[in-house]
Image: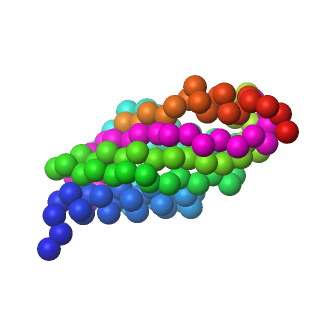
Amino acid sequence: MKTIEQNNIETVTAFIEAFWNRSELDCVDRFLSADYQELSYQSKEGLKQFAARILEAFPDKQYTVEEIIGQGEKVLVRMTVRGTHQGMFFGTAPTNNAIDVTLYRQYRVEDGKIAEHRGWIDMVTMWHQIRGKQR
């Protein structure tokens, strides 16, 4: 029998793969609770809009889970996102520069659904890489 932590890690891992890597933006109803709290992007819709911006700007983006820790209902993930800046990103025209950026996400999982999310990304490094040497 799996522990609550193992189940929660599996839920979060499946969400990251479907939502962030396969860009199945409508999977939110499958993974997120009805009373889901989005503390980084304000709402489920805000999360989807941000993910669409990322997909437009970095169509080849790939998120890799580097470390994942479960403790009770909380799951903390350290990830790397890699991709090529090929579309508009917050007013910045494509540079074709590669990004390789660390981000952290904290999820709270209740009854098999993600109920809360907080995220942190190293935007200083990301902007430096985007605006770096033009190819």
* Image position, residue 76 (x, y; %): 32, 45
Query: In the rendered view, does 62 fall on the left or right side of 39?
Result: right
Q: Residue at x 37, y 47 (%)?
A: 77
Against 30, is 105 above or below? above
Query: In the rendered view, does 8 fall on the left or right side of 51?
Result: left
Instruction: Give yes or no for residue 27 being in the magenta stretch.
Output: no
Q: Residue at x 58, y 54 (%)?
A: 62
Query: In the rendered view, does 106 fall on the left or right side of 63?
Result: left
Picture quarter with the N terminus: bottom left
Magenta portion: prevailing SS class:
strand
Query: In the rendered view, does 58 fall on the left or right side of 21?
Result: right
Instruction: Give yes or no for residue 115 being in the magenta stretch.
Output: yes
Instruction: Give the magenta-colored segment's residue range.
Output: 92-117
The foreground one among 80 and 29 is: 80
Q: How many marks?
A: 0
Q: Is the image coloured rainbow, by chain, by secondary structure, or in one colour?
A: rainbow
Asked whether the viewer can see residue 33, the reply is no
